Amino acid sequence: MAANVNFPFICKKNIAHGLESHKMSIIFNEEGLADVQTPCVAQTFINHGALLYKIYAIGTKFHIVKRPSLRNFADSKWSEESTIFFNSHNISSGDCTPNALSTLDVDDDQPQQINESLVQDLAKHLHIDINMSLYGADIIICTKTGRHYIIDVNVFPSYDGVEDYLQQLADHVLFKISLQ
């Protein structure tokens, strides 16, 4: 499938679960194409202020959890960068420690504020479009434009950071059973 993917871009393994699914790379230039490990999904990298929003859905309830993410990369230096290999779990999990890939430089653009009503609308549409009531979505916000991007959708995610999620899950399952 052809897409409008530009340098730099992130390569994600084309698998949904397991340790291998967290192995990724950032390809900055044509020389880095030799580092692409197929099969993979490629997405244009967007500077987003090292902040990722996890959207967790349990039925019709949606929760927003902030997570660290990849730092910004200077536009002028992309062509000079070597491929970066990383494990997304070490960057964006709830218990990871800040590191060189997730820490902004002092002169970097700061993260934009999330538009919660927009995210609620996105979550409602996603709920309908994928016909699922238990899922997670990762959203980043471009530091230059403020535009929100869904960069990943996860089936039955960890719900890490959602208070009382087990009770909410139980309530949702009981509700679904009551409909039958």
Image (spheres, rainbow, N blue to C red):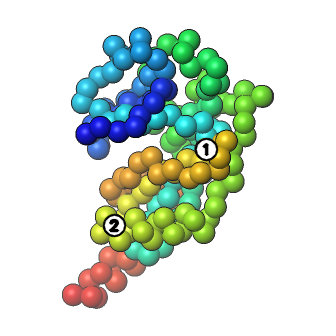
Q: Indicate which disc residue 70 carries.
A: none
Q: Nearer the viewer, residue 172 or 28?
A: 28
Q: Nearer the viewer, residue 132 or 98?
A: 132
Q: Indicate which disc residue 142 carries.
A: 1
Left-right relation of 157 to 17: right
- Image location (x, y in percent) of residue 12: 36, 34
- Image location (x, y in percent) of residue 142: 61, 44
Left-right relation of 102 to 33: right
Q: Which residue is mark 2?
A: 129
Q: Amino acid at mark 1?
A: Cys
Quadrant of the rendered image containing residue 163: bottom right
- Image location (x, y in percent) of residue 120: 53, 68
Name the residue located 48 percent from the left edge and 64 percent from the top edge. Answer: 122
Q: Classify mark 2: helix, strand or loop.
A: helix
Name the residue located 38 percent from the left edge and 69 percent from the top edge. Answer: 127
**Location of the N terminus (image quadrant):** top left
Query: Where 104 sits versus 152, above or below?
Result: above
Q: Residues within 10 Å of mark 1 (few under 14, many from 20)?
A: many
**Can see residue 165?**
no
Name the residue located 62 percent from the left edge and 25 percent from the top edge. Answer: 75
Name the residue located 44 percent from the left edge and 75 percent from the top edge. Answer: 60
**Location of the C terminus (image quadrant):** bottom left
Query: Where 125 sits versus 153, above or below?
Result: below
